[in-house]
Image (spheres, grey):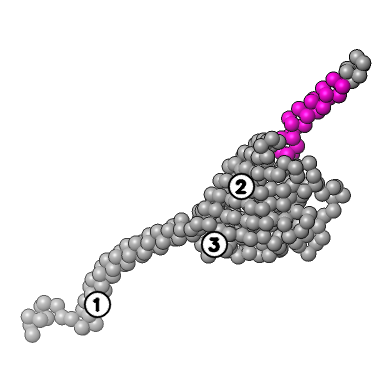
């Protein structure tokens, strides 16, 4: 009987150790998956500072995600995330399809740069089109298993801050208070892959920027984004809603710029007006001089003799 008890105790210890290791390793596994998925989707290095998966609470927290800028551009990153949270259905974590009632991403910073005909967003979107099959070229087959898929009932992206800049020229800041997406992956029974989810999030943000503030983007950035997004194609049938006043900041800036331009034009006009008076006086003197030479005006001596 003693050996049976010892085997039972040993089995329990093994289960506990495996459970502890799994609990500790799950954060690392999730972090690796997000980093590799983002890097694969956008073609530039994606880093995540930290993640915590609450197996008992069903909540996941994210901290400090950053997407590198393509080589040759100035900004420290193409896109960064302050923090995020995920609510998951615990039972689905063990399966191939993860059900997510709510995914929230906060404090997104996005740098759009254009320099001498090339743009960082175009590099990203071109790569995204290749890996998702949106381009004319077939998507690359890596031979690897697809991995877990996700069904997200609601995705909320808050405080999106965009800096659109033509290097060496104009820079326009735009703020989108909130973007909401619904029913991601619900159009099929399989859901969406992590790499596709990354593309959907980026596409939703860029589409909102174009639709809400495209006319305010400098140097043809708006048109370039439209073309790049068209090449990526439709990544899913989901609703996108923008909440809040997107163009207020940029419109105010444009208004102030126009006001300053008007003030400058007025100052130039005043200076030109002053210069005009001086020019008129100089012209009168010149006319007087020419009149004397051509007989158009007589000097005092001649006038006295007459």
Q: Is residue 119 visible?
A: no
Q: Which mark is residue 24?
A: none
Question: SS for tag 1?
Answer: helix
Provide the major secondary structure of the magenta segment: helix
Q: In the image, is residue 29 part of the stretch drawn in magenta?
A: yes
Residue 13 appears in the picture as rendered: yes
Q: At numbered mark 3, what does the secondary structure look like: helix, strand or loop?
A: helix
Residue at 87% from the left image edge and 49% from the top image edge: 143
Most foreground residue, 95 or 156? 95
Magenta stretch in the rendered image: 8-32
Residue tagged 2: 104
Q: Dividing the image into 4 quarters, which one contains the C terminus? A: bottom left
Q: Position of residue 271 (x, y in %)?
A: 30, 64
The mark nearer the N terminus, 2 or 1, is 2
Q: Is residue 275 above or below residue 204?
A: below
Q: Residue at x 72, y 57 (%)?
A: 186
Residue corresponding to mark 1 = 287
Q: Which mark is residue 212?
A: 3
Name which quarter of the figure residue 55 lies in. top right
Observer-side mark, 3 or 1, equals 3
Taking the image as shown, residue 19 lies to the left or right of residue 115, namely right
Camera-side residue of 230 and 306:
230
x, y percentage for residue 115?
A: 60, 56
Of pointers 3 and 1, the one earlier in the residue sequence? 3
Q: Which of pointers 2 and 3 lies earlier in the amino acid sequence?
A: 2
Whether residues under marks 2 and 1 lie with C-beta atoms below 8 angstroms apart, the answer is no
């Amino acid at each position: 009987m003693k050996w049976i008890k010892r085997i039972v105790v040993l089995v329990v210890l093994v289960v506990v150790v495996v459970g502890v290791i799994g609990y500790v390793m799950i954060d690392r596994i999730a972090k690796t998956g997000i980093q590799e998925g983002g890097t694969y989707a956008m073609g530039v290095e994606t880093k995540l500072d930290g993640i915590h998966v609450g197996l008992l609470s069903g909540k996941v927290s994210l901290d400090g995600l950053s997407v590198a800028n393509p080589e040759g551009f100035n900004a420290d990153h193409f896109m960064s995330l302050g923090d995020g949270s995920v609510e998951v259905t615990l039972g689905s974590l063990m399966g191939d399809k993860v059900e997510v009632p709510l995914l929230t991403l906060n404090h997104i910073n996005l740098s759009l740069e254009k320099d001498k005909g090339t743009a960082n967003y175009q590099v990203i979107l071109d790569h995204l089109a290749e890996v998702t099959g949106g381009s004319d070229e077939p998507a690359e087959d890596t031979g690897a298993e697809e991995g877990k898929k996700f069904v997200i009932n609601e995705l909320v992206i808050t405080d999106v801050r965009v800096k659109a800049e033509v290097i060496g020229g104009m820079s326009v800041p735009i703020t989108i208070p909130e973007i909401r997406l619904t029913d991601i992956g619900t159009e099929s029974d399989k859901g969406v892959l992590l790499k596709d989810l990354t593309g959907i999030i980026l596409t939703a943000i860029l589409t909102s920027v174009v639709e809400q503030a495209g006319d305010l983007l400098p140097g043809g950035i708006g048109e370039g984004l439209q073309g790049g997004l068209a090449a990526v194609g439709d990544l899913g049938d989901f609703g996108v809603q923008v909440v809040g006043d997107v163009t207020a900041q940029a419109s105010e800036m444009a208004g102030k710029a126009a006001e300053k331009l008007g003030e400058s034009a007025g100052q130039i006009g005043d200076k030109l007006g002053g210069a005009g008076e001086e020019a008129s006086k100089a012209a009168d003197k010149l006319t007087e001089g020419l009149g004397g030479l051509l007989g158009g005006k007589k000097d005092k001596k001649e006038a006295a003799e007459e």
